[in-house]
Amino acid sequence: MYVKAKTNASRSALSALTVSLAALLSACSVGPDYQRPDLPAVSSYARLDATQRQEPAPEAGQAFWRGFNDPELTKLVELALRHNQDVQLALANYQQANAMLGSAKYDLLPTITASSQASNERSSADQQPGVAAAERDYHQYQGSVGFSWELDLFGRVRRSVEAQRADTRASADDIAAMQVVVVGELAQTYFQLRGWQEQLNIVRDNAANQAQTLSLLQLQQGAGWPARLIVDRGRAQLETTRASIPPLEAQIAVATHRIGVLTGNVPEALISELETPAALAQLSANVPMQAPGELLRRRPDVAAAEHRLAAATARIGVATADLFPHFTLGGLIGTQAFDAGALFARDSETRSLTLGVDGSFLNVGRVRARIAASNAQSAGDLASYQKTVLTALEETENALVQVSRSEQQRHHLEQAAAASVRAAEVAKVRFDQGAIDLLELLDAENVRLQSQDALAQSRARHTLAVVSLYRAMAGGWPEYVANEAPNKT
């Protein structure tokens, strides 16, 4: 319904009412206020050795991949952060959410409108019999400026802005989360590539040694010694070693293609750049001595889930406000005349002031259904937040175990590989001296190949475990991601 102020008395009464209503605008906001959920009480550091639990160093906020001192990796990460399509999509979603936040904020202010119109009308001869055609023409000119403003007495608009602000912050966290995913996958793929290249070099070196041994056996066979069985054994081992080369080459090609796509390029763009093997860098996992819960809260996916929970909580208030009437204050001032020259003359002005009351709150059943839906959405977002936290804890615990155990495994395999190399060298000397037969030499060379290959795989696994730990605990991320991601509104 609408009440129109036509007299001075009514206008004064309406003005007093408007002032009173405006004073109440910030009085209350219906619906629950957001309460930050508590994180589970955990102690993940039990999974770490004492040497891995360290106080935060001054460079703790440095991007962790720079700690590997690998310029190629740093270059690839920077390319991915600028050109990866998933990061670009997350950025576009943030920009959309931020624009919607700006639009929501305008709902707190009056909506200003302006219009102007010039019209010409002619009545028919039947409407005005005996009147000349020129006299049946009517001209009308008018212009006006008006406003409409919802008096946010129960906080519906403010809760809506609160929800959109939380959504915008979640979208900003989504950018950081996508950066973590992309850079984490890139670093892991890059180190897998370097590990496979190291394995390929080991296999090729061993194949060359085995080929030399086979050539020597074939010469000796021509002289009648050794038996055919020995030569076939040597050839079988050589061909088995060579057979492991094509799968490694295929894995290297697949990893190279993946890195190309992660950096926003076509799959084959980085083949020439990455085909030259490089040493597999190592980085210790120094975890800052902070509460695990606080480290997990720094994870952008956890932060995004929390902000979405805050948005859902605010939308309960939006729905709850529909239980109360919506008051809208409107006004208009303008001018109207039948002659353009008199448009701004005295007594040509028009004005109106209205107070509108929306009666949709009387549909209580529908309103309460929307409130129930909002409560269910909030419960769902709470469950999603808790799931995200538990998943983060699981990833952290798994990474801690993998780092600790892979470090131990690498230590043992380093000793095994060194021993197998010494044993193979001694076996070759003794074989040349005739002290051992070919089978013993082949066994020694096979053990060396297996030990070196296992060590190369162990180095790669340990490096991947370190990357997973930094990714899981958000170590080495906050400052860099904060600088890369847009400012949160």
Image (cartoon, rainbow, N blue to C red):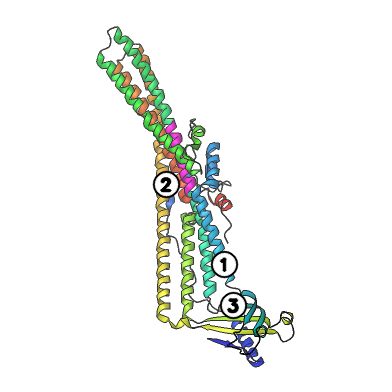
Task: Indicate the amino acid at tag 2.
Answer: Ala
Give the image location of residue 87, x and y in percent.
51, 50
Give the image location of residue 43, x and y in percent.
43, 54
Q: Is residue 459 visible?
A: no
From this view, report whether residue 259 is shown above or below residue 453: below
Q: Which residue is mark 2?
A: 399
From this view, report whether residue 124 is shown above or below residue 392: below
From this view, report whether residue 391 is shown above or below residue 36: above
Magenta-colored span: 181-197
Task: Indicate the amino acid at tag 1.
Answer: Ser
From the viewer's perspective, tell me whether residue 220 is left or right of residue 255.
Answer: left
Q: Residue at x 67, y 79 (%)?
A: 141
Q: Which residue is mark 1?
A: 103
Principal secondary structure, stretch drawn in magenta: helix
Task: Indicate the amino acid at tag 3.
Answer: Trp
Mark 3 or 1 closer to N-term?
Answer: 1
Q: Is residue 218 visible?
A: yes
Give the image location of residue 64, x and y in percent.
52, 44
